[in-house]
Image (cartoon, grey):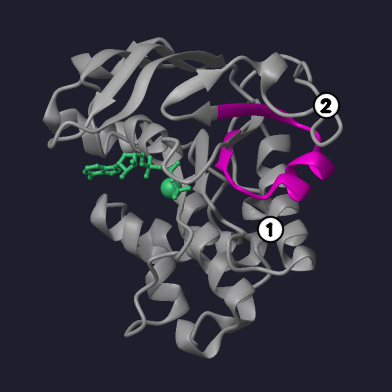
Amino acid sequence: MIQFDQVKKRYPGGHEALNSVSFELETGAFAFLTGHSGAGKSTLLKLVMLMERPTHGQVLINGRNLSRLHKSQIPHYRRNIGVVFQNHHLLFDRSVYDNVALPLLVSGYPARDIGRRVRAALDKVGLLDKERQNPVELSGGEQQRVGIARAVVHTPRILLADEPTGNLDPALSEEIMNLFRDFNDIGVTVLIATHDIALISRMGHRVLTLENGEMLSSASAASASLVQPEIVQPEIVQPEIVTPGMAEQTTTAKPDLPHG
Ligand SMILES: Nc1ncnc2c1ncn2[C@@H]1O[C@H](COP(=O)(O)OP(=O)(O)OP(=O)(O)O)[C@@H](O)[C@H]1O
Ligand SMILES: [Mg+2]
């Protein structure tokens, strides 16, 4: 569960990016976060991944108050979160495989786990045959899928995406969204920041709307003709989280639980 309670974020220089934002997103939910440019979407996601801290108020993740997390606990906390960026932040001097392996190396996963996890994640996004290539040789949609593989390689419980389809055509956007849906189907909580109203209305999930740093109520989230009203998600019991495809991919090792 992602819970914001009266969260304010003021950046140095006095700009108030979020003002008294409160909402709850249940475990296993799939929701969009929308709003004009500068509304505070990226800021909200950064507070969840602890790239920023609130000026006031509380962020609770699965009941845990992030303001009580010590700096030294942040890497461990982040093992529960996967993040997909708009411009995917891939390293163009390394192979697809190395890009996806990076978060595992940084978090000190055992070497024997890394190959299995990277291949399972690449398999899931349909890029197993490209592991030796450099991202520069891939299409925009393929690059974005590498970014998604990297976000899920550590089997996070929460998947955040910031404009993940920003540069993609509608067909590719749909494909990427279906991937997010697959992860949601196995219990991963998904929150996607996007401007893409057409996409939101096609998918028909819950919509959180920010305007000038304030969260509008779901009822007024968007015009009814464009966006379906909030859909109540069934409460999904968090199952053992295994990246889809991971079990099939495994030859010697058993599928394992997320770390942390
Ligand atoms: N590091 C920062 N320092 C100062 N101000 C910032 C910083 N990051 C964001 N802001 C400001 O906070 C406000 C919200 O920014 P944010 O990036 O959250 O918006 P957004 O909804 O993600 O916009 P976009 O759709 O353009 O990505 C903006 O006015 C922005 O200029
Ligand atoms: Mg943004």
Q: Indicate the position of residue 123 as horizontal and vertical percent values.
A: 64, 66
User: Could you classify mark 1 by the number of other residues whose Cα lies within 10 Å: few (under 14), some (14-19), or many (20 or more)?
Assistant: many
- Tell me the quarter of the picture where residue 18 sits: top left
19 left or right of 203 in image: left
Identity of the amino acid at label 1?
Answer: Ile
Residue at 48% in and 86% down: 132
- Which element carries disc 2, helix, strand or loop? loop
Q: Which residues are magenta?
A: 189-209
Give the residue furthest to the right.
Answer: 225
Q: Indicate the position of residue 57 as horizontal and vertical percent values.
A: 29, 11
Which residue lies under the disc numbered 1?
176
Q: Indicate the position of residue 222 as horizontal and vertical percent values.
A: 71, 29
Kindly tell me whether mark 1's CB lies below 8 Å from ligand 2. no
Q: Which mark is residue 130?
A: none
Residue at 59% in and 66% down: 145
- Tally of numbered tags: 2
- Which element carries disc 1, helix, strand or loop? helix
Can residue 236 be seen from the camera position used here? no
User: Could you classify mark 2 by the number of other residues whose Cα lies within 10 Å: few (under 14), some (14-19), or many (20 or more)?
Assistant: few
Which residue lies under the disc numbered 2?
224
Residue at 73% in and 36% down: 185
Identity of the amino acid at label 2?
Answer: Ala
Q: Nearer the viewer, mark 2 or mark 1?
A: 2
Up-down: is 32 above or below 82?
Answer: above
64 left or right of 174 in image: left
99 left or right of 231 in image: left
Residue 234 belongs to magenta span:
no
Residue 193 belongs to magenta span:
yes
User: Which comes sooner in the sequence, label 2 or label 1?
Assistant: 1
240 left or right of 234 in image: left
Q: Nearer the viewer, residue 20 or 54?
A: 20
